[in-house]
Image (spheres, helix red, strand yellow):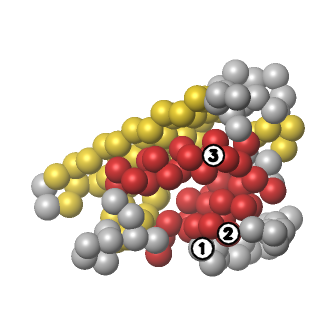
Amino acid sequence: MSENYYLPRSGPMPRPNSVEEAREVLKQEAFDAPNVQNITFRALEFTAVCPKTGQPDFGTVEISYTPRHKCIESKSMKFYLWSFRDHGAFCESLAAQIADDIMWAIEPASVKVTVHQTPRGGIELTTEAHREFTE
């Protein structure tokens, strides 16, 4: 994408138009990494849509990464995760996509994404995706 997407510095956050747009925001809002070894985001109100039934899937997402040169700005992470609210995806593919998008946006040394899906029909699901930077 060649367009620039930025979040407003104050006021209400706009609703994401797509996961692709929100992915661009992750990259464009990234900032220089300070001397830290690990950063963890926990999103306790994650929602996506089941691609089979169209019903919402609720859960939590934990993203832990070791920065190299850039860090993800937390407001852009909220915007990015919000973009999945209308996005149809299986829980297994969500963990992989989020990990891949973070690798693309900031090229961390490593990232681990864990998606915990709230039980539906008596079944609870947890998926993990791990990525490491290679040159």
Toward which corner of the image does residue 133 lie, by quadrant? Answer: top right
Quadrant in which the C terminus is drawn = top right
Label 3 sits on what residue type? Ile
Q: Nearer the viewer, residue 116 or 88?
A: 88
Q: Residues within 10 Å of mark 1 (few under 14, many from 20)?
A: some
Toward which corner of the image does residue 90 lie, by quadrant? Answer: bottom left
Compared with residue 116, is residue 20 higher up or lower down, i.e. above or below? below
Horizontal side of 68 relative to 82 (left or right) equals: right
* Residue hosting label 1: 18
Element on which disc 2 rests: helix
Query: Residue at horizontal 70%, vertical 76%?
Result: 14
* Residue hosting label 3: 102
Query: Residue at horizontal 64%, vertical 74%?
Result: 16
Query: Residue at horizontal 46%, vertical 58%?
Result: 45
Q: Where residue 26 sits: x, y (%)?
A: 71, 55
Q: Is tag 2's residue or tag 3's residue first in the polypeptide sequence? A: 2
- Asked if the residue at tag 1 contacts the one at tag 2, i.e. Cβ–Cβ closer than 8 Å, the answer is yes
* Residue hosting label 2: 21
Compared with residue 82, is residue 26 higher up or lower down, i.e. above or below? above
